[in-house]
Image (cartoon, grey):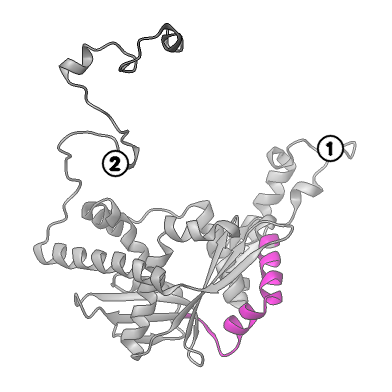
Amino acid sequence: MNPGIYYDLPFDEYLAIDAVNNSSLGPIQKSMAHYKAAIEEPSEPTEAMKLGSFLHGGVLEPLVALGRYVVMPPFHDQVRRPDGSRYDNPRNTKPYKELKAEFMAANADKTVVDSDWYESLRGITRAMRAHPDVCRYFRDGCISEVTLVWIDPATGLLCKCRLDVLNRKHRRIGEFKSIADASQFEWQIWRLNYHRQFAFYQDGLDVLTGERYEVFVVAAETTGPYYGLRASPVDPKTLDAGRAIYRDCLAKIAECRARNEWPGYTDPNGWRLPEAKMPSIVVMSAADMQKPPFMDMGDVTGTEELGHFV
């Protein structure tokens, strides 16, 4: 696909573009062999990733999400014993499994999600609507799910990304992130290398437009009843730190492609503790080891003074 900005590209077609994307860069932290293996055999998404995708779609493209997802009815609240009492674990009962199987068969063309996920989506949506900056940055003149394809100037690699929200009017990139505890989002940026992602997206748009766009991020909690939310632009120094990481990754990819070599781990010279966990060790000489294991008495001679030590 030619470099450019694509506003209506279906997600399946985006996935088919043969280009470097941010999510593929993670395994490089281990080795280039890990990167190549992950490209050739992608791993299955985790439950947390599936929840994130559902919330992402529901927040940014609600009409599309309606056609893609369907919520499992609360059958666990409906099944009862013959006497009308509740089961201790209704999801393990035969009546529940039958109702679930019937519902799944009737909605085979959609992804079935748990009702708890839907409640999370409702809570997050309410929180975003109540936040003035989020309403302004994610609504006014915004376009969701915008695909960028560009050639990295330093390496010549074809790159791609898919922006959550693009606001050409105010020159902003909007990104939505779900998290269990929004008070810890700064650590989440570091743990999941979001700063690398944000810088990658910002630079891609810079290449295509010649303009520097601000990156604005919403971190929304997935659990209630409050569904806390924090929103802010990304600090330039944080973007610079992420930029250094992705630039190093692209350089390694370009070098490995040129040589057609994908090295794995390097062997250590010797196994040792991580530097941060290495204790301070004082190595004693043979002469020091002959001394008694108590402090030097110096010129102390009186019994009164000695009484403090013996």
Dominant secondary structure of the residues highlighted in magenta in the image: helix
Residue at position x 29%, y 54% in the image: 29
Label 2: how many Cα within 10 Å (few below 14, some 14–19, many 20+) = few
- The vertical placement of 190 against 286, above or below, is below
Residue, far right: 83
Amino acid type, residue under disc 1 in the picture: Arg
Amino acid type, residue under disc 2 in the picture: Glu
Labels in figure, total:
2
Whether residue 8 can be seen here: yes
- Tell whether 42 sits left or right of 135: left
Whether residue 109 can be seen here: no
Residue 272 image-quadrant placement: top left
Q: Position of residue 294 (x, y in %)?
A: 34, 14
- The vertical placement of 72 against 234, above or below, is above
Q: Which residues are magenta?
A: 119-145
- The vertical placement of 71 against 278, above or below, is below
Q: Quadrant of the N terminus?
A: bottom left
In this view of the protein, which residue sits in the foreground, 108 or 125? 125
Tell me, for residue 81, which label it has, or none.
1
Q: Position of residue 300 (x, y in %)?
A: 35, 14
Between disc 1 and disc 2, the foreground one is 2
Q: Position of residue 201 (x, y in %)?
A: 38, 76
Residue, far front: 302
Residue, far left: 259
In this view of the protein, which residue sits in the foreground, 146 or 251? 251
Q: Position of residue 4 (x, y in %)?
A: 34, 87
Tell me, for residue 275, which label it has, or none.
2
